Image (cartoon, rainbow, N blue to C red):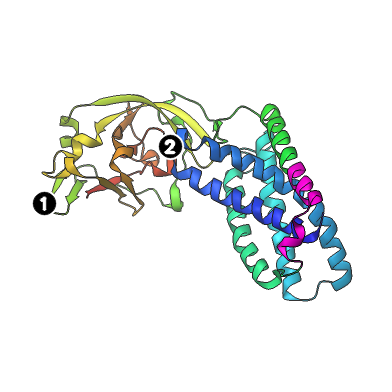
Amino acid sequence: MPRRLANLALLGAVTTLLVSGVVAWLLPDTGAATLYGAHRVAGVALVLALVWKYAIARRSLRRRGVRGTGVWIGIVTAALTIVAAGLGLLWTVGLVSFDRPLAYSALNLHVIAGLGLALVIVAHVLVRGESRPALATLASRRTALRALGLLAASFALSAVFDQIGVAKRATGSRHAGSFTGNAFPVTIWSFDSVPTIDVETWRLRIRTPSAPPAELSYADLGALPRHEASVVLDCTGGWWSEQVWSGVSLKDVLARSPVGEMATRVEVISVTGHRWTFDRSEVEQAMLATHVGGAPLTAQHGYPVRLVVPSLRGFLWIKWVGEVVAA
């Protein structure tokens, strides 16, 4: 395969992996299925294109040695590619998981390596970007056949890996036990420490642009209509667990503010500062949960209140909710 075609194949695969991986986090499960499939196919394409890239890089190193900034950027790029692709493959076939071989999820390490790879590739392209041969010279029948062959092989091998891989959701997450109350895994976004909250003084603040803030105590929440639902928590750390959550509807909480019911966007803020803004349609079924499996939430799982948003990924389920802003 021509050098530039191999480089373009790698660049296209990495770009697809980055976009599909990040965007899929933000979409409901039903809207991200195509992106999950594209991510798997692009991952296989990346590994296959590396076969050609290896031969190209070996010839380049023999000719140039290891001198020069561009060479070292290329070496770092190769190392991150091997880590990211290797962990993705090992995860797919079940040799690593969210709790082995390290306490820290191998899928998180895969994501970190992938994001690092994207940054290094930008530097690599700036330092060693090619202007020759022109792209028009690649537009040949042989080039098209090679590209189609790479794509077909990527689809075929992706289907094979799906068959031999261990059971998991479309997101790649593994089952971590269901209907176990507070016994499901603990993952904390942004490495926040678990806050100590005095429920007697804790207040849920509801803010809107054109009305004075409203505040609800834990007892006030208990006086609102109770809701219970069995909902899957799918964590970006690579695990999922279905639990029975109970608490109050976010819509009922918004109704305690004069203009909250008319809000089109809702921001939920943790006492730690973790926050996310949702379209109103995304949180129509959302719950501010106080209990799981019939027991109060533990501090690690968000006591006294955490957000539960069916179909959205776990990092959007804000823990230790302290404020809701409606706009």
Residue 189 at what x, y percent from top left? Answer: 44, 48
Q: Nearer the viewer, residue 308 or 56?
A: 56
Q: Residues within 10 Å of mark 1 (few under 14, many from 20)?
A: few
Reading the image, the residue beneath label 2 is 28
Q: Say if 284 sits above or below 320 in the image.
A: above
Please name the amino acid that badge 2 sits on: Pro
The location of residue 56, given as percent across then percent down, is 83, 60
Q: Residue at x 19, y 38 (%)?
A: 253
Residue 211's tag is 1
**SS state under label 1:** strand
Residue drawn where x is 54% and y is 50% of the image: 19
In the figure, residue 138 lies in which quadrant?
bottom right
**One can see residue 218 in this view:** no
Q: For this view, does 136 lie left or right of residue 61?
A: left
Looking at the picture, tell me which residue is in the foreground, 275 or 10.
10
164 vs 25, left or right, is: right
Q: CA distance from mark 2 to mark 1?
A: 32 Å
Residue 296, x across and y down, in percent: 31, 31
- Asked if residue 169 is positioned above or below residue 46 in the image, the reply reads above
Disc 2 element: loop
Image location (x, y in percent) of residue 115? 58, 56
Specify whether 285 is left or right of 132.
Answer: left
